[in-house]
Amino acid sequence: MPPRKIIIDTDPGQDDAVAILLALASPEDMDVLGITAVAGNVPLELTQKNARIVCELAGKTDVPVFAGCDRPMGRQLVTAEHVHGKTGLDGPSLPDPTMRLQDQHAVDFIIETLRREDAGTVTLCVLGPLTNIATAFQKAPDVIERVQQIVLMGGAYFEVGNITPTAEFNIYVDPEAAEITFKSGIDIVIMPLDVTHKALVTQPRNDAFRDLGTPSGIAVAQMTDFFERFDKEKYGSSGAPLHDPCVTAYLIAPELFSGRHINVEIETQSDLTRGMTVADWWGVTDRPANATFIGDLDADGFFALLVERIGRL
């Protein structure tokens, strides 16, 4: 099979960086048409910079990077420096990028690409808030039916929330964008906290990255060294969950994951539960299924894949 054409929409973020590295290291599986940055973990000025830093770390400076929306569709931006540090990529000491940022707006790139490529051949890999995606769908509704699939990291059901008691960060930041996306009719696969919290970087797993001895492997280990302090303190876990690499790993090895095709609705009205992904895991409503909600993964297989692919860079 030819590699799958993808656009990575992202707000790097250490775990975003690992997801991007995995994609860039897997050309036989994924053809990265472009990387679109959005405001999320840190403001847009940093997310677009971080995306270029990661491309240069991987030695893939030919991948175009575009800056997108600098705020949610109808709300003030909420960021997560308390998790990712002031740069979003705290941990390793990485040089400022020299590759240029594309002039075109990310939303226009998404629209143009979906119109240019054959219908049903481009997958959107979304690692942050869904602002760029929903904005593209509103601006150019004709592209919706041209999307092959959306695979995204966001939401939760059993794990409830990580930014509020009921909401996961990516969905919470722009719930209106999430609602537009989930009502689009596109084939959606969602990687919620329920699965990403099982992708824990234990010490032996982080040692495997560091032992690669490559700039990418060492940087991943250093990112996780920084990143894990938050989750260890908050959850008492043995390491940091690598949320976003679940998205790109799924496209390479979907057999590592399992879930259910269910209805998922986004709460946008309630101040108490804003951004909650109301997932009908038990099928107790008659609302039609609109997403494959992943609930489990083979963690050992997941990390073996990550180490093998990042070791190529």
Image: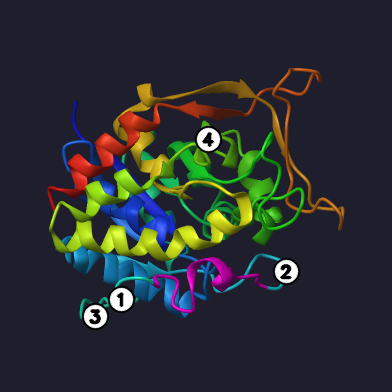
Which one is in front, 177 or 227? 227
Q: Determine the CA span between mark 2 and mark 3.
A: 33 Å
Mark linked to residue 75: 2
Name the residue located 34 percent from the left edge and 67 percent from the top edge: 51
Classify 54 as above or below 16.
Answer: below
Please provide percent x and percent y for residue 176.
Answer: 71, 55
Classify 311 as above or below 28.
Answer: below
Q: Does the magenta segment cover residue 292?
A: no
Classify 245 as above or below 217.
Answer: above
Name which of mark 4 and mark 2 comes first in the sequence: 2
- Residue where numbered disc 1 is placed: 101
Name which of mark 2 and mark 1 comes first in the sequence: 2
Q: Do the residues labelled 2 and 3 touch (CB within 8 Å)?
A: no
- Residue where numbered disc 3 is placed: 95
Q: Residues within 10 Å of mark 4 (few under 14, many from 20)?
A: many
Q: Determine the CA span between mark 2 and mark 1.
A: 26 Å
Q: What residue type is labelled 3?
A: Pro
Mark linked to residue 195: 4
Between disc 4 and disc 2, the foreground one is 4
Mark linked to residue 154: none
Q: Give the range drawn in magenta.
A: 77-90
